[in-house]
Amino acid sequence: MDADAVKAHVAAVQRDGYTIIEDAFDAVLADGLRADLDRLEAELGVVPAGNDFEGARTLRIYNLLVHGVLYEQIPLLDTVLPVVEGVLDPGCLISSLSSIVICPEEKAQPIHADDILIPLAKPHAPIVCNTMWAVTDFTDANGATRLVPGSHLRENPEYGGDYETVPAEMGTGSVLVWDGALWHGGGANRTTERRYGIAMNYCAGFIRQQENQQLGIPADLVRRFPARLQQLVGYDVYRGLIGHIDKQRPLDLLMNTDPSEAMVWDG
């Protein structure tokens, strides 16, 4: 994605709270993801959580980075990550990576903000930037994410309140990107087909990740990740300070290498 396109998408997130990147990934990846999610569902015995937030007919698989190399390319996609970095900054982290498959007869998810549990007065600068990957088409009928445009500039919604929303309809291969303060929720699926999505969520480098990446992903697996993915899961330091271990980057300790960057005190 060129610099002008990145700027336009970042500006849309700043203005409206969200943007849609069309044709962000190809049909081969979409087909592969859909097939592998079906495999994991069967192997892991995945069933709906049954609570109000996660849904009674929605299937979710968390911590996808431990389930194969197919998922390792998702956080790094060059049609999406630069937009996220523009909303947050290049020191951002993976907050969580999960699948959300909305099955027929699922009702709409309560409207909420993804940063609602973080005790900061609103509006505030973006601290969470989340993305939803359309592994199948997202339509108003099959559960496309419902959005309240501009609500990222307001205080938190009343959880589950009745709000006027618009559906983030998009074709397979598109990615919805939004400020974590935006009011939104998964839609109701009134069709006979499943709606497959991947929730690739990021947070600022100074915010605690939703999923604990350091314990959730085996160290031996992280050692073979590409360098940028190692940074994104949290093995670097933010601005030369946050996340250090005895004035060293966790990545240097993980890889048993000499310190490669100065800490803030040494600048």
Image (cartoon, helix red, strand yellow):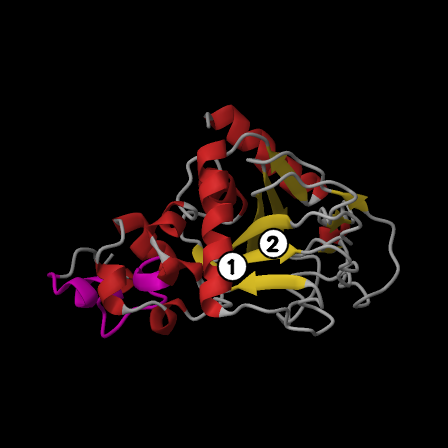
Amino acid at pointer 2: Ala
Residue at 26% x, 62% y is: 221
Nearer the observer, 62 or 105: 105
Nearer the observer, 195 or 217: 195
Tell me where residue 197 appears, x and y as whole percent: 59, 49
The residue that label 2 is drawn on is 125
Instruction: Determine whether the residue tagged by mark 1 lies in a helix, strand or loop.
Output: strand
The residue that label 1 is drawn on is 98
Instruction: Determine whether the residue tagged by mark 2 lies in a helix, strand or loop.
Output: loop
Tell me where residue 103 appears, x and y as whole percent: 69, 56
Mark nearest the camera among 2 and 1 is 1
Tell me where residue 173 appears, x and y as whole percent: 55, 35
Residue at 45% x, 34% y is: 28
Residue at 78% x, 42% y is: 140
The answer to whether one can see residue 160 in this image is: yes
Report the magenta residues as a range. 234-258
